[in-house]
Image (cartoon, rainbow, N blue to C red):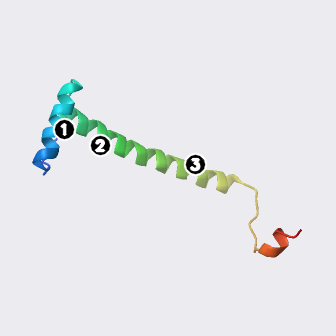
């Protein structure tokens, strides 16, 4: 496993240590969990975009020029 060095405000680190202690965990575990969430959310986003692109590739829908005006859509 790799090591990571961070610069963090002293007061923020002190508060984080107290909170981690109350939650029976470590700063290391908190940072690791948040990094995993950060990467996972990007992977989920990429998977969603890939799925959408695949859907449009398979789709039979044709997209043409806009042949209507806003006023035509909202005629009363």
Q: What residue is at 20 percent from the left and 31 percent from the top?
A: 20
Question: Measured from the top left, where is residue 71 in percent x and y?
Answer: 81, 75
- Residues packed near mark 2 inside 10 Å, few (<14), some (14 to 19) or many (20 plus): few
Mark 2 or mark 3, which has the lower sequence index? 2
Which residue position is annotated with label 2?
A: 35
Mark 3 or mark 1, which has the lower sequence index? 1
- For the N terminus, which image quadrant? top left
Mark 2 or mark 1, which has the lower sequence index? 1
Give me the disc on residue 40. Answer: none
Res. 16 image quadrant? top left
Question: Measured from the top left, where is residue 5 in percent x and y?
Answer: 12, 47
Q: Is residue 40 visible?
A: yes
Provide the secondary structure element on which disc 2 rests: helix
Q: Name the foreground residue: 64 vs 54.
A: 64
Res. 17 image quadrant? top left
Question: Measured from the top left, where is residue 39 in percent x and y?
Answer: 36, 45
Which residue position is annotated with label 1?
A: 16
**Left or right for 25, reference 42:** left
- Residues packed near mark 3 inside 10 Å, few (<14), some (14 to 19) or many (20 plus): few
Q: CA distance from mark 2 to mark 1?
A: 16 Å
Provide the secondary structure element on which disc 3 rests: helix
- For the C terminus, which image quadrant? bottom right
Q: Name the foreground residue: 55 vs 10.
A: 10
Q: What residue is at 82 percent from the left and 68 percent from the top?
A: 74
Q: What residue is at 32 percent from the left and 40 percent from the top?
A: 36
Which residue position is annotated with label 3?
A: 51
């Amino acid at each position: 496993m790799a090591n990571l060095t961070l610069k963090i405000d002293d007061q923020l680190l002190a508060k984080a240590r107290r909170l981690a202690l109350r939650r029976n965990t470590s700063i290391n575990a908190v940072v690791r969990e948040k990094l995993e969430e950060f990467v996972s959310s990007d992977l989920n986003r990429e998977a969603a975009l890939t799925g959408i692109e695949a859907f449009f590739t398979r789709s039979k829908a044709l997209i043409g020029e806009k042949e209507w005006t806003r006023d035509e859509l909202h005629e009363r």
